Amino acid sequence: KAGVTQTPRYLIKTRGQQVTLSCSPISGHRSVSWYQQTPGQGLQFLFEYFSETQRNKGNFPGRFSGRQFSNSRSEMNVSTLELGDSALYLCASSRTGTGNTIYFGEGSWLTVV
Amino acid sequence: AQSVTQPDIHITVSEGASLELRCNYSYGATPYLFWYVQSPGQGLQLLLKYFSGDTLVQGIKGFEAEFKRSQSSFNLRKPSVHWSDAAEYFCAVGAEQAGTALIFGKGTTLSVSS
């Protein structure tokens, strides 16, 4: 079956702009999570959505937001981009998010210039 | 504080030799433990996971890991490394109440020499 699909794979944005990243989870999975990966901070949890509700949130500023649709697809948005937001953003899906295997997508590479 | 430590930043192993990657964790609840592998420019691929039960778990690509609660460790092993195993390996810890909020280690980069 198809894995976790993220779009776009690569993008370049200017400081101050906003960006929206998209994630389609594995069919049947209702939990979608987002992670940020940078060389300095490593992999950090952003937030998790389950049944269109944010269920868990990491320690990131309010500029980072997300949502989930009724078909479990998710989007994350970063407003007022800063240079430090340059990162690989990974989406992960699991069946229910609790006690299930967590599968990751290939990620979206964001460069802020 | 909850954390995952992978003491080795970079390891080089000869092809055909055995491999052990170390992972220690500090976590307040009963942990779920994972090992993921990441090739350059790619996402994370799950190698294996431990939720409960048998403390020796088998994964894909010939990898295995052993959960040792007394040592708070979850080391990854492979008896014979192949050149294609060169990648970055991440240990992660979570818990039922944390959902999918995993805490990752900083990763260990594996190089394989011929």
Image: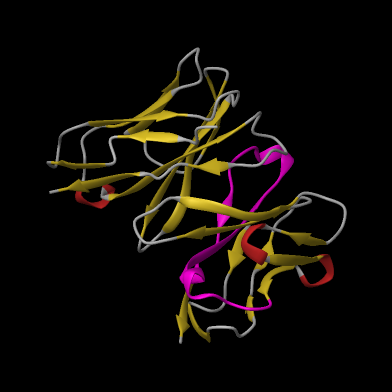
Question: Image check: A64 left or right of A24?
Answer: left
Chosen colour scheme: secondary structure
- The residue closer to the viewer here, B29 or B15, is B15
- Give the number of marks: 0
Question: Image check: B105 left or right of A61?
Answer: right
In x, y percent, where is residue A41? Answer: 40, 59
Q: Residue at x 40, y 27 (%)?
A: A66
Could one spot residue B81 in this view of the protein? yes
Picture quadrant of residue A1? top right
Q: Is residue B104 above or below residue A4?
A: below
Could one spot residue B1 in this view of the protein? no
Q: Is residue A29 a member of the stretch shown in magenta?
A: no
Q: Which residues are magenta?
A: B79-107
Residue placed farthest to the right in the image?
B53
- The residue closer to the viewer here, B99 or A28, is A28
Picture quadrant of residue B101? top right
Residue placed farthest to the top in the image?
A70
In x, y percent, where is residue A74? Answer: 43, 25
Picture quadrant of residue A35? top left
Question: Image check: B26 left or right of B89?
Answer: right
In x, y percent, where is residue B45? Answer: 53, 52
Q: Is residue B91 a member of the stretch shown in magenta?
A: yes
- The residue closer to the viewer here, B86 or A97, is B86
In x, y percent, where is residue B16? Answer: 59, 83
Q: Residue at x 14, y 42 (%)?
A: A15
Question: Image check: A103 left or right of A109?
Answer: right
Q: Residue at x 12, y 41 (%)?
A: A14
Q: Is residue A111 above or below residue A41?
A: above
